[in-house]
Amino acid sequence: MRNREGAATATPIQTMPSLPAYMNYPLDDVPAPGETLPIADGVRWLRMPLPFMLGHINLWLLDDGDRTTLVDTGLNSRETQDHWRRLLEDHEVSRIVVTHMHPDHVGSAGWLHEHYGAPLYMTRAEYLMCRVLVADTGQPAPRAGVEFYRAAGFDEAALQRYQERFGGFGKAVYDLPQAYHRLQEGDVMTIGARDWRIVTTSGHCPEHASLYCERDGLFIAGDQVLPTISSNVSVWPTEPDADPLGFWLDSCRHLQDELDDDVLVLPSHGKPFRGAMGRLQALIDEHEDNLDALITLCAEPRRAIDTFEALFQSRITDGNLIMATGEAVAHLNHLVQRDRLTRETDDAGVHWYRTAQG
Ligand SMILES: [Zn+2]
């Protein structure tokens, strides 16, 4: 999307020239992959490598008495697990907390559980959805998937490629433990000397968990608020009429209500920053601008794939077509929900969107 970059979105990396005035990065240093940097008493910032676009994910190590609670785990990869082995050589792990089910966050959770015996903490929707997606690995693409992308305007070649690539999710995720501990909105986890309140949000994934220590002004944001990129908000074939963008916008407003403006945001990608309120507003505004652009565009009937130019700065290629389509449908579904667009399906099963009259 506009001014977006990175693995979480359909758009390639674009470096922001500078942060807007309402934001700042209080820390100059960034840990090298596999290294940690203290952020606050008992909180360490750990970076793990990612083989795609952004190149890194931020994880957090929280002192928990003489043990350590981990927040997010990195991909299921040899490189990540080698880093963990070294980092945890003299540590006992008390808990493995996972913000959400995307492979860069949950990928090594099962491996860590198996090797260090610590229990897994996730929200229910993330845990269950992750198990469902892992179970798809090695299966043929479902008919619902082919119908969904045909409806979006894919040609036969693109549908063929979708089917060939289906089921890759599980390769980046180590099998989850068979049991987990459920996180819910408002839960308080006491970790070492701090109380962390769970704040759940939706849109980027079904039930994302962030951790908020109000007393010390620390917010472990996961992918819910990132400093320079907008998290991917997509519709998937499993629930073709979903309105994740509606949930995403509500979630941004929920966080505006919950957080203090001077909170230090610890995001999963990029650097810790201050200026949460302004950043949340910019995320909302960016999506609202995109929605306005689609209302104008759909004066003539359009398919999802016809909206890319209005939504994305960069060209959509084979490699990011699925992501881009998911984001486009998220915007279109939201406008249908708001009665700003109508949707008609032609004889070939393709959805056409048109600006609603009156
Ligand atoms: Zn994510």
Image: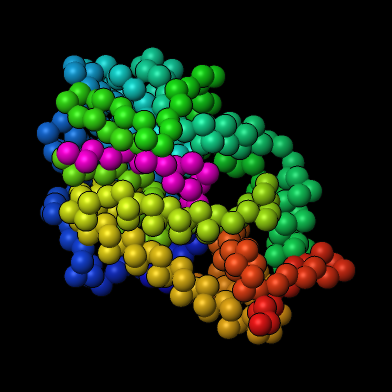
Between 188 and 118, which is closer to the camera in this rendering? 188
Residue 169 position in % (x across, y down): 57, 41
Out of 83 and 150, give the one closest to the viewer.
150
Left or right: where 2 falls relative to 240: left
Task: Please state the extent of the stretch shown in magenta in the rendering.
Answer: 199-215
| Magenta-drawn stretch contains 203 | yes
Q: Residue at x 83, y 70 (%)?
A: 346
Q: Is residue 242 visible?
A: yes
Q: In which quadrant of the rendered image does the C terminus lie?
A: bottom right
Residue 39 to residue 253: above or below: above
On the image, the x and y values in percent for residue 12 come to 43, 64
Q: Is 144 rendered above or below residue 38?
A: below
Eyeballing the image, is 166 above or below 118?
Answer: below
Q: Which quarter of the figure has residue 7?
A: bottom left
Dividing the picture into quadrants, the one containing residue 149 is bottom right
Quarter of the view holding residue 6: bottom left
Foreground pick, 229 / 288: 288
Residue 13 makes an appearance in the image = no
Q: Position of residue 150 (x, y in %)?
A: 75, 62
Q: Is residue 63 left or right of residue 98?
A: left
Residue, x 51% and y 36% (percent of image)?
126
Q: Is residue 25 magenta?
A: no
Q: Residue at x 85, y 67 (%)?
A: 348
Q: Residue furthest front?
A: 358
